[in-house]
Image (cartoon, rainbow, N blue to C red):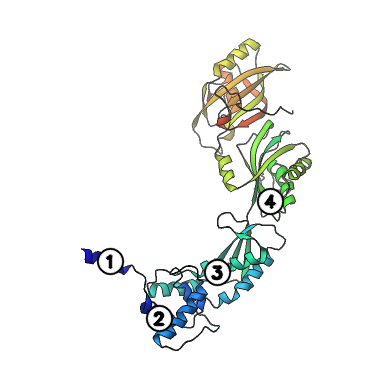
């Protein structure tokens, strides 16, 4: 058994000495090959040495120890087509491609022609090589070194600002500029503005008479009012708004505002002053939307804000079809305060949501006052609670509802979102655990 174990172990030992030189000779037998590619076939055999030096050393050592004629590399490598002689050229072209674009980190990628990939894989397979380095890995590294020297920037394998793609087949350098992300909160003071861009329902964005050939269902959105000036300031091609939930088109977002992250696509600038950017956005939006920007962030923060199930607080103007006293109205509110509400998908969104019953809690609901015979209330609910249906009952699809408890129809006349917080920021009674801004409306 011991002999068998020793035998198995020896099978995994990389070739040494004469055997290594024999394999190098077999590789040289395929045809003219550069030192880079020769060294790459043994690329993981040692550290602190370049593939070019490794290949040259193998070539010289083989000539000395086996008494074969020494042949240096000319200019006709059958594997890489002498791409490694163009490392400086590729780096210079990459730097030219990024001219005028601000960045602090980069990554290099290489798109290898199928013939080159097949050629090196054939040698790996024929000679059962276990430790080669692919051509694209060395190209990425060596061109990256030269770009670093030319620009003074550092390579970042995880979150680079810029990605250079060396397309060897097309003989071009492609550029991918990673987006910039900024976090903040927005207030929406005008009703009738959706959170994000909507294509025209009639033409689906193509442009028609109904949308005045704009391709848009609504001429403005929170996303566009914030994103247009931000993209212009950073030299980006566009912007995408990622919000912590969304309010209805006919609702205002006031009070503390809604958390959001704005993604600016392909920016030419990355170090714009945050206060100046905030002022520019607010001036451009002309009071329809107001933002407070808090910090620059990353893509991981988008996932966090999307997954955050925030409690929300609403201020609602309620119309009741019938005569009801303040005392009776307040008593009806107390009946659903703290209650679990069963809501079948509302009729108004049934065309785009799964038809099912959801359970959500009303954390707090209270009477605030009256306005022209209508009641003003504030509701704090779990994420996903349909507020309009909580009041109207939605033709008995929501239980209990204010309409059901009152015994007479009730409906939302106007709705404002006044607070959006994470679940760790709201107590069970619906009050906040941290100070909030005063309502500015």
**Number of the front mark, 2 or 4:** 2
| Residue that mark 1 sits on | 8
Instruction: Please determine whether, in this image, residue 331 is positioned above or below residue 121.
Output: above
Q: Say whether disc 2 or disc 4 marks the residue closer to the N-terminus.
A: 2
Q: How far apart are marks 2 and 4 (CA)?
A: 54 Å
Q: Distance between the residues labelled 1 and 2?
A: 25 Å
Q: Classify the position of the C terminus by image quarter.
A: top right
Question: Label 1: how many residues lie within 10 Å, few (<14), some (14-19) or many (20+)?
Answer: few
Q: Say whether disc 1 or disc 4 marks the residue closer to the N-terminus.
A: 1
| Residue that mark 3 sits on | 139
> x%, y% of residue 429?
56, 21
Contact? badges 3 and 4 (CB < 8 Å)? no
Give me the disc on residue 26.
Answer: 2
**Number of the front mark, 1 or 3:** 1
**Camera-nearest residue between 166 and 17:** 17
Is residue 406 at least partly visible in the picture? no
Q: How far apart are marks 3 and 2 (CA)?
A: 24 Å
Q: Classify the position of the N terminus by image quarter.
A: bottom left
Q: Distance between the residues labelled 1 and 4?
A: 59 Å
**Camera-nearest residue between 331 and 198:** 331
Residue in the picture at 53% in, 71% down: 113
Q: Is mark 2 on a helix, strand or loop?
A: helix
**Number of the front mark, 3 or 4:** 3
Q: Please tell me in which quadrant of the rendered image residue 28 appears.
A: bottom left
Residue in the picture at 55% in, 19% down: 336
Q: Distance between the residues labelled 1 and 3?
A: 36 Å
Q: Please tell me in which quadrant of the rendered image residue 200 appears.
A: top right
Q: Is mark 3 on a helix, strand or loop?
A: helix
| Residue that mark 4 sits on | 238
> x%, y% of residue 237?
69, 54
Q: Say whether disc 1 or disc 2 marks the residue closer to the N-terminus.
A: 1
**Number of the front mark, 1 or 2:** 1
């Amino acid at each position: 058994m011991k002999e068998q174990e020793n035998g198995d172990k020896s099978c995994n030992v990389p070739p040494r000495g004469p055997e290594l030189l024999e394999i190098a000779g077999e590789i040289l037998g395929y045809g003219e090959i550069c030192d880079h590619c020769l060294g790459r076939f043994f690329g993981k055999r040692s550290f602190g040495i370049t593939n070019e030096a490794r290949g040259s050393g193998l070539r010289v050592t083989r000539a000395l120890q086996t008494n074969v004629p020494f042949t240096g590399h000319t200019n006709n490598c059958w594997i890489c087509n002498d791409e490694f002689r163009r490392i400086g050229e590729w780096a210079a072209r990459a730097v030219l491609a990024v001219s005028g674009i601000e960045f602090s980190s980069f990554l290099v990628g290489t798109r290898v022609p199928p013939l080159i990939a097949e050629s090196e894989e054939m040698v790996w397979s024929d000679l059962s090589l276990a430790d080669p380095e692919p051509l694209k890995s060395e190209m990425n590294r060596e061109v990256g070194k030269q770009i670093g020297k030319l620009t003074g920037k550092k390579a970042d394998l995880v979150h680079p600002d810029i990605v250079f793609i060396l397309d060897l087949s097309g003989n071009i350098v492609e550029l991918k500029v990673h987006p910039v992300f900024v976090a903040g909160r927005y207030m929406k003071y005008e009703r009738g503005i959706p959170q994000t861009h909507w294509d025209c329902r009639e033409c689906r964005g193509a442009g028609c008479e109904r949308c005045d050939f704009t391709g848009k269902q609504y001429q403005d959105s929170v996303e566009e009012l914030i994103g247009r000036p931000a993209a212009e300031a950073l030299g980006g091609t566009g912007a995408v708004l990622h919000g912590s939930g969304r309010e209805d088109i006919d609702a205002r977002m006031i009070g503390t505002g809604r958390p959001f992250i704005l993604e600016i696509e392909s920016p030419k600038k990355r170090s714009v002053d945050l206060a100046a950017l905030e002022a520019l956005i607010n001036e451009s939006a002309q009071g329809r939307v107001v933002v407070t920007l808090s910090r620059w962030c990353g893509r991981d923060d988008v996932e966090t804000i999307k997954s955050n199930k925030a409690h929300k607080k609403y201020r609602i103007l309620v119309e009741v079809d019938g005569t009801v006293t303040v005392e009776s109205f307040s008593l009806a509110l107390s009946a659903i305060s703290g209650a679990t509400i069963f809501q079948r998908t509302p009729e108004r969104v049934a065309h785009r949501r799964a038809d099912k019953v959801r359970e959500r809690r009303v954390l707090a609901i209270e009477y605030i006052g009256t306005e022209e015979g209508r009641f003003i209330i504030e509701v704090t609910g779990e994420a996903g609670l349909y507020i309009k249906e909580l009041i109207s009952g939605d033709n008995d699809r929501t239980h209990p509802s204010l309409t059901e408890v009152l015994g007479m129809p009730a409906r939302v006349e106007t709705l404002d979102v006044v607070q959006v917080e994470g679940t760790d920021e709201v107590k069970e009674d619906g009050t906040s655990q941290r100070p909030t801004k005063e309502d500015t409306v």
